[in-house]
Image: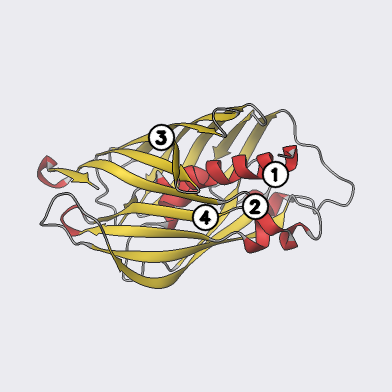
Amino acid sequence: MSRKKSSLTARAFALMAMIASTTAYADTNWPVEVHASYEIRFNGLKVGNFEFASTNNGQAYTMTSNGKVSVLLGAMKWTSTINTKGQIVGSDIRPQQFDFDLKGSTKGGTTKIGFTGDTVSNVEMTPPPKHKDDEIKVEPQHLKGVLDPFSAIMAMTKGGTNPCARKIPVYDGKRRLDISMQAKGEVPLLIAKPADQPTTGVVCRVNYKLIAGHRPGDENTYMNKNQHIEMTLRPIPSANIYVPYQVTASTLLGNITIFAKTVTIVTKQANQQIVLAH
């Protein structure tokens, strides 16, 4: 297996973990706490899992995620930790700090992004990114009004009449891109409990478009043009949110699926606790 292909797979696992581990919020009455456990499968086989937790007091939020992946009988392993925090201004997300740590047998590194107001103020990456002479430069205007990858998924999946109608500007420390979704329909869900919640999920196609920080032509590569990512959202009306039920993607090496095992939600209204088992 080439280092390039394993690097693409590591990027796919990291991206999907960010997408799957973020609960979709419907309005400013966001849940006080969310705890979720997800299982990761690669070509149908279980290869890992990760845990997600978030807190929200109406003015500020924190999100954390810890994951482990092992494929090819342990020949390739990755562990990731994500921590982000920010402010809630009305129904908008305003990140303050994003920390991403990826360790693996073929790829690893850290990314730290700081924000002042709605603008990126500092970036630290190890190892430092290698910039090419023909790279489309990230300009100051590209760093204003953007979200970090974790906060972006939180904003991208908040509720509404059409949860798939989202377009979010994102900066990951090196690249500026737009993430958007398109509605693909509804599907029945395999639900263990509770029976009083809807059992139909909304399927969204996840797309991303490179804006800056990449070389001309990169947007036409397999990873950026042909990777198919779909997210199934489970509506939870009693909590006024959507929950990522399943995320699927195709990569150069095969298909990745991440699905929710358990999700516990503590609502703002009457401190209600909702436990979902899939």
For the N terminus, which image quadrant? top right
Give residue 226's mark: none
Which residue position holds label 1?
5
How many angstroms separate mark 4 from mark 3 (CA)? 17 Å
| Label whose residue precedes the other's in the sequence (2 or 1) | 1
Relative height, residue 58 to residue 72 (above, below)? below
Horizontal and vertical percent position of residue 229: 51, 58
Which residue position holds label 2?
252
| Label whose residue precedes the other's in the sequence (4 or 1) | 1
Q: Nearer the viewer, mark 2 or mark 4?
A: 2
Which residue position holds label 4?
249
Q: Which of the two residues, 185 or 132, is positioned nearer the viewer here?
A: 185
Residue type beneath disc 3: Phe
Horizontal and vertical percent position of residue 77: 56, 29
| Label whose residue precedes the other's in the sequence (1 or 3) | 1
Residue type beneath disc 4: Ala
Relative height, residue 75 to residue 256 (above, below)? above
Secondary structure state at the residue bearing disc 3:
strand
Q: Kindly check if marks 1 and 3 are in contact, taking CB atoms under 8 A apart as contact.
A: no
Give the residue at x 24% y 56%: 190
Residue 74: name its quadrant.
top right
How many angstroms separate mark 4 from mark 1 (CA)? 15 Å
Side of 34 relative to 170 (left or right)? left
How many angstroms separate mark 2 from mark 4 (CA)? 10 Å
Q: Which of the two residues, 142 or 159, is positioned nearer the viewer here?
A: 159
Q: Residue furthest right?
A: 133
Residue 204: name its quadrant.
bottom left
Report crowding for label 3: few under 14, some 14 to 19, many 20 or more residues within 10 A (C-alpha): many
Give residue 50's mark: 3
